[in-house]
Image: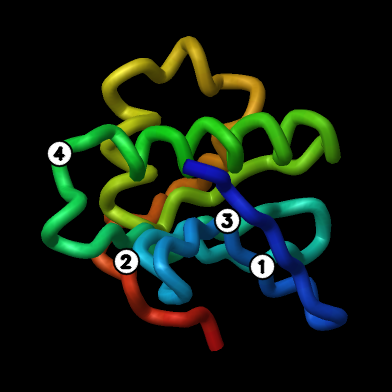
């Protein structure tokens, strides 16, 4: 499974997987002021449970570290991954007093 990457001139991007000419998984984000807002992760139902979202997550973490970005985990999946192993992501995790709840997953930022 080959993870692809794209980012547009508005700094909205995605890590995604194409199989048989259709997108089957994605992790969508937006970057502003050095903060990567990871707002959606999705995998087609027939591929769930195979660790695909975790692979997309790992690519996002690698990218954020390479670029020096902090990560705001507004997607429930990303937030759960950070909360399970907070020490592993302390260098990335953008935390605020009104920290996102993860309820925004799947909703594009305004």
Q: Where is residue 5 drawn, in percent x and y?
A: 68, 57
**The quadrant where residue 12 appears:** bottom right
Marks 2 & 1, CB-CB < 8 Å contact: no
Q: Earlier in the sequence, mark 3 or mark 4?
A: 3
The quarter holding residue 84 reads top left
Residue 49, disc: 4
Query: CB under 8 Å between callouts 3 and 1?
Result: yes
Residue that sits furthest to the front in the current view: 20
Q: CB of mark 4 within 8 Å of CB of mark 2? A: no
Q: Is residue 12 left or right of residue 29?
A: right
Q: Is residue 70 left or right of residue 37?
A: right
Q: Residue at x 31, y 62 (%)?
A: 42
Residue drawn at point x = 52 percent, y = 59 percent: 16
* Category of crowding for the residue at label 3, using alpha-carbon neighbours closer than 10 angstroms: few (below 14), some (14–19), many (at least 20): many
Q: Is residue 31 above or below residue 87?
A: below
How far separated are the C-alphas under marks 1 and 4? 24 Å
Percent x, y for residue 98?
41, 55
Callout 3: SS = strand
106 left or right of 31 in image: left
Q: Earlier in the sequence, mark 3 or mark 2?
A: 3
Front position among marks 3 and 1: 3
Mark 4: few/some/many CA within 10 Å (<14, 14-19, 20+):
few
In this rendered view, identify the residue nearer to me: 65 or 87.
65
**Which residue does the numbered mark 3 point to in the structure image?**
15
- Give the number of the mark in front: 3 or 2: 3
Q: Position of residue 91 (x, y in %)?
A: 65, 22
In the rendered view of the protein, which quadrant contains the C terminus?
Answer: bottom right
| Residue at mark 1 | 13
Q: Which residue matches tag 2?
A: 105
């Amino acid at each position: 499974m080959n993870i692809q990457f794209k980012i547009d001139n508005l700094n909205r991007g995605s890590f995604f997987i194409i199989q048989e000419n259709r997108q089957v998984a994605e992790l969508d984000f937006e970057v502003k002021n050095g903060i990567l807002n990871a707002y959606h992760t999705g995998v087609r139902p027939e591929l769930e449970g195979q660790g695909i979202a975790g692979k997309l997550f790992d690519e996002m973490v690698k990218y954020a570290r390479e670029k020096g970005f902090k990560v705001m985990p507004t997607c429930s999946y990303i937030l759960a991954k950070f909360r399970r192993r907070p020490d592993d992501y302390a260098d990335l995790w953008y935390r605020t007093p009104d920290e996102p709840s993860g309820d925004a997953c799947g909703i594009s930022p305004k």
